[in-house]
């Protein structure tokens, strides 16, 4: 699902960059406008206008506040479901023509549902502790022989994860090549930041009566049949997500009662000026954490009966549309 998000953003970028050539000739404001110059640099501005100084004064840097709404999703071991809902709040301060700094809070809910059934889940506490019987490997005998007790309860992994992050970001304007273009109609920017992610993952493993589900009537799906398989699973699930997801209790720092991890983030955005102080933005932000449990699943398909940890950490993205206001 994340690949579809990226394809959408790429297509939108191509469309916008095509129209940008037509907009650039008329966008912007008069470089003589003294209202853009702070009092501390007005002397240089006047000298520049009177051909007494070679460089123009640097325009005023603005503060911006913004609200964005969109859909977060997790890229992990369980297929994500789209769309979801999330929001972000930020305060941004420009420090030059190219770079600005932003503090942002993000909160959203990501969900996932696998269309492939699994029997190799006995390391996953969310399913094992609720009485499900998957493949179990046995060891014993004089030669320490290995045996296998076949599982009887197929499951379809699912999750509902409450994601939050606090981040400090640097934004790099990629379109302000012609300096002193104070009010461009369009801007394209890159995002680079660090922060902390705190999350809580839950699994829908029990029905309304507190009993385990019986998925035996649903065959494991394929890419071509995934929509039908998911529809059949949703008929059985009650959507309560009552079971805490699998967790690494040995290294599990908390923030506001939720699992916390240091995170880094990268992204791309574009902004369209609606008025002198208001602009509309579209962003795609991808965050990395050193954690494989955002989706509540970290165990591989092998060895059968004694699964090992998967090799990749989970990531999450936030595709959003925002409204930003320059306050002064």
Image (spheres, helix red, strand yellow):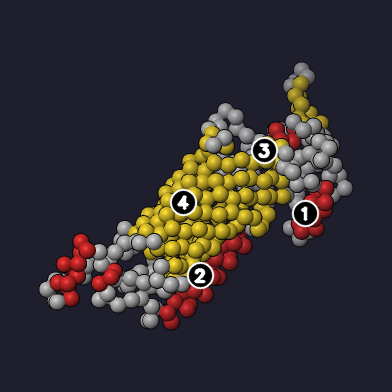
Q: CA distance from mark 1 to mark 2?
A: 32 Å
* Residue under the image location 76 percent in, 58 percent down: 227
Rendered view: 285 above or below 129: below
Residue at (62, 62) in percent of width and height:
4
Instruction: Residue at 39%, 66% (x, y): give it.
Output: 174
Which of disc 1 and disc 4 is earlier in sequence?
4
Q: Are marks 3 and 1 in contact (CB under 8 Å)?
A: no
Under circle 4, the secondary element is strand
Q: Quadrant of the C terminus?
A: bottom left
Nearer-the-camera pick, 84 or 13: 84
Q: Which residue is label 1 attached to?
A: 230
**Residue 104: mark:** 4
Q: Nearer the viewer, residue 22 or 139?
A: 22
Secondary-structure class at tag 2: helix
In three-dimensional space, the C-alpha distance between marks 2 and 3, rounded to whole angstroms, equals 37 Å
| Crowd tier of the residue under label 4, counting other residues whose Cα lies within 10 Å: few below 14, some 14–19, many 20 or above | some
- Ranked by sequence position, the earlier of labels 4 and 2 is 2
Q: Secondary structure at mark 1?
A: helix
Residue beneath disc 3: 245
Please say whether residue 211 is visible from this viewpoint.
Answer: yes
């Amino acid at each position: 699902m994340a690949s579809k998000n990226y394809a959408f953003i790429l297509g939108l970028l191509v469309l916008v960059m095509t129209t940008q050539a037509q907009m650039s000739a008329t966008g912007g404001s008069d470089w003589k406008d003294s209202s853009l110059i702070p009092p501390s640099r007005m002397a240089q501005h006047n000298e520049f206008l009177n051909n007494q100084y070679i460089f123009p004064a640097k325009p005023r840097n603005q503060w911006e506040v913004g609200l964005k709404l969109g859909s977060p999703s997790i890229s992990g071991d369980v297929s994500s479901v789209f769309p979801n809902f999330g929001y972000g709040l930020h305060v941004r301060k420009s420090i030059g023509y190219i770079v600005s700094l932003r503090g942002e809070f993000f909160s959203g809910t990501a969900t996932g549902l696998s269309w492939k059934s699994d029997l190799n889940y006995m390391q996953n506490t969310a399913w094992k502790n609720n009485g499900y019987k998957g493949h179990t490997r046995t060891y014993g005998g004089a030669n320490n022989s290995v045996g296998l007790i076949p599982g009887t309860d197929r499951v379809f992994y699912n999750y509902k994860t409450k994601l939050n992050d606090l981040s400090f970001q640097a934004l790099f304007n990629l379109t302000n090549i012609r300096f002193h273009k104070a009010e461009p109609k369009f801007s394209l920017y890159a995002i680079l930041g660090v922060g902390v992610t705190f999350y809580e993952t839950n699994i829908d493993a029990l029905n309304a009566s507190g009993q385990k589900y019986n998925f035996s009537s649903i065959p494991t799906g394929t890419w071509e049949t995934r929509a039908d398989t998911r529809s059949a699973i949703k008929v059985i699930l009650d959507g309560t997500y009552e079971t805490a997801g699998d967790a690494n209790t040995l290294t599990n720092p908390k923030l506001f009662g939720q699992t916390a991890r240091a995170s880094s983030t990268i992204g791309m955005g574009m902004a369209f000026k609606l008025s002198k102080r208001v602009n509309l933005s579209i962003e795609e932000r991808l965050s990395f954490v050193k954690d494989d449990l955002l989706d509540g699943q970290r165990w591989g398909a092998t060895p059968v009966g004694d699964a090992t940890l998967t090799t990749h950490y989970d990531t999450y993205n936030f595709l959003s549309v925002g409204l930003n206001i320059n306050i002064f």
